[in-house]
Amino acid sequence: MAKARVQFICQNCGAAHQRWAGKCDSCGEWNTLVEEGTSGGIGSGPGSLKSARKGRAVTLTSLDGDIEDAPRIVSGIGELDRATGGGFVRGSALLIGGDPGIGKSTLLTQAAAALAARGHRVVYVSGEEAVAQIRLRAQRLGVASTPVELAAETNVEDILATIADGKRPDLVIIDSIQTLWTDLADSAPGTVTQVRAASQAMIRYAKSTGAAVVLVGHVTKEGQIAGPRVVEHMVDGVLYFEGEGGHHFRILRTVKNRFGPTDEIGVFEMSDKGLREVANPSELFLGERHSKAPGAAVFAAIEGTRPVLVEIQALVAASSLGTPRRAVVGWDSSRLSMILAVLEAHCGVRFGQHDVYLNVAGGYRISEPAADLAVASALVSSLTGIALPADCVYFGEISLSGAVRPVAHAQQRLKEAEKLGFGRAVLPSGSGELAGGIGAGSFQPTALADLVARIAGSRRSRAEETD
């Protein structure tokens, strides 16, 4: 009889090693390698392979068959339905991650209550809280009277046996996947083996029965969902619930969705009565704007299919240090270094003796390069002390040659800005036909130097008007 092969699996990153070591070569963590057999751990299916069964033939079909539409379960919470692409898809598995205390359980409790009120069977299984604690949250949210079925259990086999009793549930919420354990694995709950095996079991249940399953995942200190990254590949959608501790709003961001667009966001406001939808996030991010202060520019961003207007603030101050400071909040620090280099090399604007601080107002995070033009305008405005026009929005990508390059969805950005009362825009040339009143007041520079000259020229024109 062949001896069973043994591997050592890192419980932090899931990497497999042939022999034990004190330190994992992949993630660098110490004392995380655990001995596991290849017959029932990472790299194999659940259970033991003592007796291999004969394969079963499956039915093959063609590409030109009828398409079965995947019906969605609409929760009625508009921002949640937007982030999921129109509602929960039957038979799908969704993974939601976020920092502790950010509001994941609150959001799912409200979603479960909304679906139960519409006549759907919803099962909420918690491995972290007792039933009484969930009831206290439901009373605080004002949804205690909805027919949501609760359970406090961590064993996967017991959970599957419970929800299989009676009518098939439309939605199953597992809070959280790191607390589950299965009889098929011998390791402790929260380890790589248990998380993967439990996820496989719940996803298999969703695909075989047509019930939608939502898994809640903890995040690491780097902001990634804890456990093996293979779980993110197994599920149909991955959503991150983001928010800063000092701000009262939360952002539900879609990073993977097999049934809808990615990079979609839903915006919520946290209150003592739970999460409230924010239908127009642009007004939220521009609510406390000081229009006459230099160093502030309004950027027209796109998140998925939604245009969002946010304020970018820059502060350029003389530095007494040999190496001036460069501090960024809500944007890429490497991108800021590139914009500063382009301004110095092609526009003659010197920042070598100045500290530069950049902030995206409201704790919002920007990832698209279309913010280059707004950042450059805010930097030049702060350095010169010239306030930018209060009714102007900025967007466009800046290349290393100093050219301003077009970006996608220009018409959507302009339409959102015009809806909020903005009458002018600075955008790249070649952005298409500009319709409406904001198009008539637009400025389309081909190079960044043209925009810098326009900002500097506004000081001379104001001085002439004063004289």
Image (spheres, helix red, strand yellow):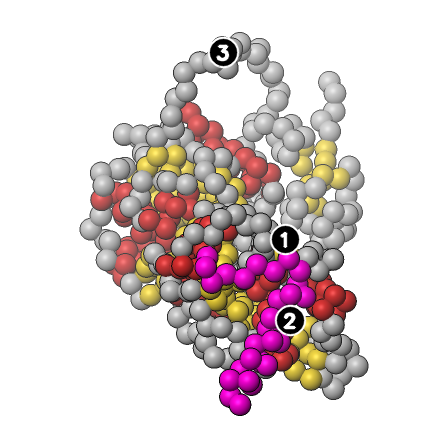
Q: Decide: few, some or many residues near mark 3? Use Cα within 10 Å; few <14, some 14-19, many ≥20.
A: few
Residue 120 appears left or right of 34: left
Mark 3 residue type? Thr
Number of the label disc, if any, that sits on residue 453: 2
What residue is shown at x 44% (from left), y 13% (from top)? 65
Q: Residue 197, percent across and down?
A: 54, 35
Instruction: Find out whether the residues at labels 3 and 1 contact each other: C-beta distance under 8 Å.
Output: no
Q: Residue at x 54, y 35 (%)?
A: 234
Label 2 amino acid?
Ala
Which element carries disc 1, helix, strand or loop? strand
**Magenta part of the chain:** 439-467
- Residue at left offset 44%, top offset 69%: 391
CA distance for labels 2 and 3: 64 Å
The residue lying toward the viewer, choosing from 282 and 138, is 282
* Residue identified by numbered label 3: 61
| Side of 143 where 182 appears, left or right | right
Q: Nearer the viewer, mark 3 or mark 1?
A: 1
449 drawn magenta: yes
Distance from disc 2 to disc 1, alpha carbons, whole Å, reads 18 Å
* Marked residue nearer the N-terminal end (2 or 3): 3
Does residue 246 show up? no
Question: Depth-wise, is mark 2 or mark 1 nearer the camera?
Answer: 2
